[in-house]
Image: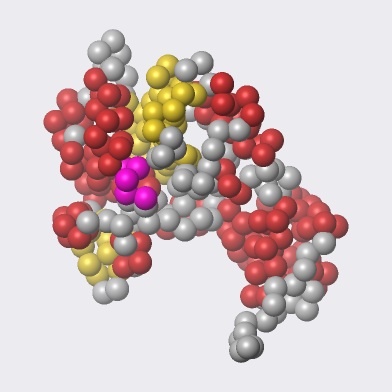
Amino acid sequence: MGVSIFPALPEISDEELATIGAILQRWRGFSLAVYKDTCMKRRVAIRIRSTRSSDAAAYCDLLSRSGQELDLLQKSLTIHVSQFFRNHSVFEKLRMEVIPELFASRTDRRDEPLRFWCLGCAGGEEPYSLAIMLREFFGREIRHERVSLLATDIDDKTLQAARAAEYDEGRFKEMPVELRERYFRQDGRLFRLVPEIRDMVVFQRGDICNPEEYVPSDLVCCRNTLIYFARPEQERILNRIADILRPGGILVLGKSEVLVGSSRGRFAPVCRTERIYRRIS
């Protein structure tokens, strides 16, 4: 059997994770309490290895002295990598059935925008995919009706990257080539999104754990974000989304995510396979 060239990740005890959590809470106001311990321990261990710290205690010492490492750790704990039109069958379902119904249901409140919200937007791939889909397939509707597309994330540097809208080729594995050619301009190894799509999305900092930051919406995408949270917090997040969705509003989860606890009584499935749900109460 071959020997890995990568050193094993260090073990993190509950006490050591609590110490790291206290440092983050004190200097960044960021709480680890709502996240899954196993997920957080693995990501902290990767930072310990990356910084060549000898153990968790040495890493805590580094973390107490380095604002840069605090930023890097927070980013590694919260970021999730995405792609344009990730799980493209979800976007097909939205395009063919869900979004046409949303536009059609607005006969009594056309003075308000149709509001889309991407929670935990990472590098912007998901909200920009929605924007491209709206521009490509709902051009007539968005010329006559106001549409709001909000994207939030807790990490400021991730949001800066999202606003810059420059991506390497690896982010386009599920995006049709003709759409990439139509809406991106290549500059060296990067592809830059055209302004007409970039300007459709408003990015702002948002903490998914803060109920005061939830905004009324018609469709909420919360894909591949819940998986990082402990089950009680997942239930709270899902109920907060139900609270701010308009009657009949749509929730889209990631492929490995499900409704939990009391939130199961607040949504009805639109498509179980694609994890698309409609608010019912």
Q: Residue at x 61, y 89 (%)?
A: 2
Decide which of 198, 1 is in the foreground and name it.
1
Toward which corner of the image does residue 123 lie, by quadrant? bottom left
The answer to whether residue 108 is seen in the rendering is yes
Toward which corner of the image does residue 161 lie, by quadrant? bottom left
Which scheme is used to colour this image of the protein?
A: secondary structure
User: In the rendering, at what x and y percent does residue 147 appear?
Assistant: 29, 30
Q: Is residue 281 above or below residue 178?
A: above
Q: Residue at x 29, y 73 (%)?
A: 189
Q: Residue at x 75, y 72 (%)?
A: 10
User: In the rendering, at what x and y percent does residue 5 appear?
Assistant: 61, 86
Q: Would you say the magenta stretch is mainly helix, strand or loop?
A: helix
Decide which of 80, 248 is in the foreground and name it.
248
In the picture as drawn, the residue positioned furthest to the left comes out as 140
Instruction: Look at the image and say whether residue 88 sits in the magenta stretch.
Output: yes
Left or right of residue 145: residue 163: right
Instruction: Look at the image and say whether residue 241 sits in the magenta stretch.
Output: no
Q: Residue at x 31, y 61 (%)?
A: 172
Left or right of residue 267: residue 111: left
User: In the rendering, at what x and y percent does residue 63 appear?
Assistant: 73, 65
Toward which corner of the image does residue 176 lie, by quadrant? bottom left
In the picture as drawn, the residue positioned furthest to the top comes out as 108
Left or right of residue 172: residue 145: left
User: In the rendering, at what x and y percent does residue 29 appear?
Assistant: 69, 47
In the picture as drawn, the residue positioned furthest to the right comes out as 15
The answer to whether residue 217 is seen in the rendering is no
Quadrant of the rendering where the N terminus is positioned: bottom right
Segment tinted magenta in the rendering: 87-91
